[in-house]
Amino acid sequence: MTRQTPTQRLRAFIASESAGGIVLIVAAAIALVIANSALLAGYQSLLATPVNFTAGELVSIDKPLLLWINDGLMALFFFLIGLEVKREIVTGQLQSWKQASLPVFAAVGGMVIPALVFVAINAGSPDNIRGWAIPAATDIAFALGLLALLGSRVPVALKALLLAIAIIDDIGAIAIIALFYTENMNVGALALALVPAAGMLLLNRAGVARTIPYFLLGAFLWVCVLKSGVHATLAGVVTAMFVPIATGDEQPLERLEHALHPWVAFMILPIFAFANAGVSFAGAGLEALFAPLSLGIAAGLVVGKQIGVFGACWLAAKTKLASMPPEVTWRHIYGLSCLAGIGFTMSLFIGGLAFIDPDQIDAVKMGVLVGSLISAVIGMTVLATAPRAATRPLNEVPSA
């Protein structure tokens, strides 16, 4: 396989994520239609179907289909995220502070401010505070899918910036899941997880380029982490960290990324969207949207993301801690900050970890869907009317 340049890898990644984002939108739309039709009971019954996996007397996992999707299939999604994060840090946009500074500031602002907006709205509802991280996430597939619809009107540099922000946002989401959404930890199972981790470390140090051994040990690690009480999807991230970028003439990490992208973009994420986006609006009026939980999530995604991402970029440029990409105007940055409010996949995922009450989960879905939709409409409108190229120096900070 001919090794791609960083620019070629970036363009291929954006193309794949963009197409996958469109499929994701269709899958979510189908789930919404089914959930608001006579097929709702069948939809719910399908997701509640018990699925059991047993391997002798050692392993027995019995979960409904929905949790196999969220804990199992999504582990592959997190594995791909881990591969992308490692590549970007070692050889990509995040390998130097000069390249990473702007997306780092933007991502941090885009996580902190939405969380504060959510907490402010839910300050009087202590049962809801656990969902503070839900509006902090950005769905890269959805956002890039919408950017693809604008074609050449959007500079590639803006897409690259959104990609970098989303990757850093994913790192933050992974840390949040590990630190704040882990309960009833089984120390024995977690200690056993060190065995496959040590095995993958030895494979890495020995320069093993074949990916099957990493997958086998990663599957063992997934079972251990699942039984430990730590969310099982984190096993995917840990496994990715051990996959070598280069071993001689082999490029195992890049090869895995190319192999996994179509499966994640066109199967795993659409299945997740279909299984998690189906919320019934029967009997739900404006009062349901303006309830603290759903309103906090929607406001965090729409208002918090705009203030957080755009404000952080503006401050970073004003203080000369970072510089803007070429051909990108402040209008582009504002449009990007709106699209960052599309939280969908990761927001729904964190919402499923934060709450078990069906009413709260429905409120989460409503808040995420409404907030993501409003963010998408505003962002697309702003970018559709943005100039095709910068008309002034990009380090110039707009006047108040």
Image (tube, rainbow, N blue to C red):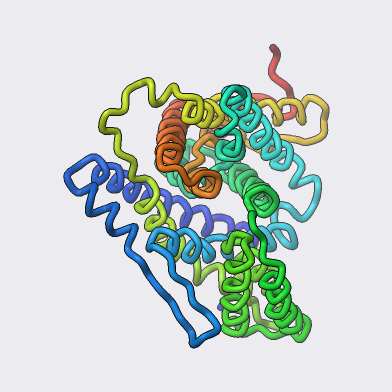
What's the residue at 54%, 55% (across, down)? 11
Depth check, front residue: 332 or 5: 332
Could you say which quadrant of the image residue 84 lies in?
bottom right
Depth check, front residue: 130 or 260: 130
Q: Split into 4 quadrants, where in the image is the N terminus?
A: bottom right
Query: From what the image shows, is residue 375 above or below residue 240?
Result: above
179 horizontally vs 42: left or right = right
Residue reaching furthest left? Answer: 38
Q: Split into 4 quadrants, where in the image is the C terminus?
A: top right
Could you say which quadrant of the image residue 190 lies in?
bottom right
What's the residue at 49%, 48% (across, down)? 352
Point out residue 328 in the picture as x, y percentages from the top left corner.
61, 33
**Any part of residue 220 in sight:** yes
The number of numbered badges drawn on the structure is 0
What's the residue at 82%, 30% (across, down)? 320
Query: From what the image shows, is residue 308 above or below residue 3?
Result: above
Depth check, front residue: 70 or 79: 70
Could you say which quadrant of the image residue 183 lies in?
bottom right
Depth check, front residue: 71 or 60: 60
What's the residue at 64%, 68% (across, down)? 240
Point out residue 65 in the picture as x, y percentages from the top left corner.
38, 63
Point out residue 242 in the picture as x, y percentages from the top left corner.
70, 73
**Any part of residue 385 in sight:** no
332 horizontally vs 278: left or right = right
Residue reaching furthest top? Answer: 400
Query: From what the image shows, is residue 320 above or below residue 88?
Result: above
Point out residue 109 in the picture as x, y percentages from the top left corner.
69, 33
260 horizontally vs 103: left or right = left
